[in-house]
Image (cartoon, rainbow, N blue to C red):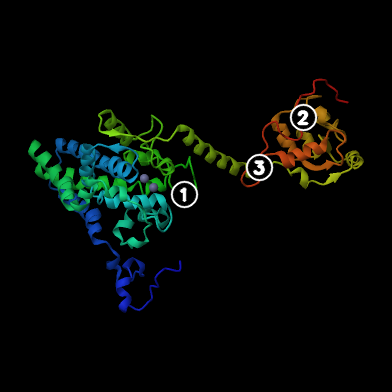
């Protein structure tokens, strides 16, 4: 990177221009690299909550309320910040937008505007230096390191958030973010349990502080765990992955490989049995008339991606297998030479003009030694293809691994046509490997030969 600032540059008048994140961390300046506000919000607050929990007993009602509020604020992030504002995967009426902006603010993860801008950069520049929480920088970095350590905002990839600037709810929440955080993060959960059943401190500690901690950690897992644990059924070129554990932790955001492929789909889980309460919430809001225009990719498009990825995996498996030397790489033998070598004790057998050395296989032949020996030095095409025994697909595959030559002219059974078929007409995969389908081996002739003629 030519534009990278040289960290060893003397700290003269240039100092102001160099962002701290672009300088080397040393024993003298490490504290300048730390984003202390975020350290307080992400680490300090939960620690203080744990300490207070020692002398504030947990009441059952408060515990239930804390869990309910955990879901409210978590869904504010997943259904609101993420699927509504960052991805526009559906539209919401004003009351629903106000609700999501409020409870989302209670999760204490920054304003919608800030969150969605980073998240759009994450999708656009996944796994690159412009990805604000690239998992390539480490699992811990993608989880919270990117917030605890200062980042040069200029290095984060640019994204368009003009649509968000037109949403008055988003703009209002951004301008009044601190008030939103204090009200929805601490005051509301405290008021509910205080006015409801007199447990002011319990509401503050459990439904407030500790609940914030759990919601934060859960949703941070979308950036870390969802890029680290699980399968990649749609595309394995980038890090996003699908896993049920991530889904359970993140209110349904765990089908992240799907999500990165189809980000504007309001769903993360597409199967009915997969856990995606965020999807269920959006769908319920639609039934209540609060949400509309739920976007969904056609299953035809989704299945295409799945099949392509499967094909890639199959190609990788196929490339590891021994399919026999391609015909055009085999030496050409004269028919008489083939017959002579077989007479002199080499276990050669010609099938469809391809010569196979079965010397080591004779003793293992399932049909017996005598049967296979009767074909040595002859054209055994018909014998192999039903004349004596209609060999299985597995037998044709095994036979191809014993190839040692092709007969010149192939007068016996149209060898060159078959050789050409294998060399030119076979479909090849991305890496140029021939795809040999069952029943398509060159030694296989299309119709079984019914009469027994073992001579
Ligand atoms: Zn992601
Ligand atoms: Zn996303």
Given residues 293 and 406, the one toward you in this image is: 293
Per the image, the residue denoted by label 3 is 428
- Label 2, secondary structure: give it: loop
Given residues 96 and 303, the one toward you in this image is: 96
Per the image, the residue denoted by label 1 is 238
Q: Is mark 3 within 8 Å of ligand 1?
A: no
Given residues 455 and 331, the one toward you in this image is: 331
Dot 2 or dot 3, earlier in sequence? 3
- CA–CA distance between discs 3 and 1? 25 Å
Residue lying at 77% horizontally and 40% vertically, measured from the top left: 420
- CA–CA distance between discs 1 and 2? 44 Å
For this view, does 369 lie left or right of residue 23? right
Residue lying at 81% horizontally and 34% vertically, measured from the top left: 352
Per the image, the residue denoted by label 2 is 445
- Label 3, secondary structure: give it: loop
Q: What quarter of the picture does the C terminus occupy?
A: top right
């Amino acid at each position: 990177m030519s534009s990278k600032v040289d960290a060893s540059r003397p700290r003269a008048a240039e100092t102001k221009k160099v962002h701290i994140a672009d300088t080397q961390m040393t024993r003298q300046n490490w504290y300048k690299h730390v984003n202390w506000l975020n350290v307080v919000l992400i680490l300090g607050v939960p620690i203080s909550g744990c300490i207070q929990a020692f002398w504030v007993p947990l009441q059952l009602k408060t515990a239930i309320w804390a869990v309910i509020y955990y879901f409210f604020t978590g869904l504010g992030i997943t259904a609101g910040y993420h699927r509504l504002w960052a991805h526009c995967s559906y539209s919401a009426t004003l009351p629903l937008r106000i609700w999501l902006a409020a409870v989302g603010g209670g999760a204490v993860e920054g304003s919608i505007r800030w969150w969605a801008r980073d998240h759009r950069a994450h999708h656009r520049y996944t796994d690159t230096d412009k990805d604000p929480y690239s998992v390539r920088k480490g699992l811990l970095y993608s989880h919270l390191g990117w917030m605890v350590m200062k980042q040069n905002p200029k290095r984060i990839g640019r994204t368009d958030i003009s649509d968000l600037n037109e949403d008055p709810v988003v703009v209002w929440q951004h301008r009044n973010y601190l008030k939103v955080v204090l009200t929805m993060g601490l005051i509301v959960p405290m008021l509910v349990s205080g006015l409801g059943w007199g447990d002011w401190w319990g509401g503050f500690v459990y439904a407030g502080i500790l609940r914030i901690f759990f919601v934060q950690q859960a949703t941070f897992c979308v950036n870390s765990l969802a890029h680290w644990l699980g399968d990649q059924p749609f595309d394995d070129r980038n890090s996003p992955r699908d896993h049920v554990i991530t889904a359970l932790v993140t209110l349904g955001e765990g089908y992240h490989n799907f999500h990165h492929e189809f980000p504007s789909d309001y769903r993360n889980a597409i199967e009915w049995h997969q856990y995606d309460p965020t999807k269920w919430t959006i769908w319920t809001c639609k039934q209540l008339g609060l949400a509309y225009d739920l976007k969904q990719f056609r299953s035809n498009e989704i299945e295409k991606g799945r099949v392509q990825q499967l094909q890639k995996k199959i190609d990788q498996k196929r490339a590891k297998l021994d399919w026999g030397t391609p015909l055009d790489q085999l030496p050409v033998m004269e028919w008489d030479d083939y017959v002579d070598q077989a007479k002199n004790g080499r276990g050669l057998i010609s099938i469809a003009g391809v010569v196979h050395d079965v010397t080591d296989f004779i003793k293992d032949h399932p049909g017996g030694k005598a049967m296979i020996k009767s074909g040595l030095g002859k054209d055994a095409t018909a014998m192999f293809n039903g004349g004596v025994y209609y060999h299985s697909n597995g037998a044709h595959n095994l036979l191809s691994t014993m190839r040692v030559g092709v007969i010149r002219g192939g007068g016996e059974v149209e060898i060159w046509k078959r050789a050409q078929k294998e060399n030119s007409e076979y479909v090849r995969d991305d890496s140029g490997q021939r795809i040999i389908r069952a029943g398509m081996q060159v030694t296989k002739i299309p119709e079984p030969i019914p009469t027994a003629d073992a001579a």
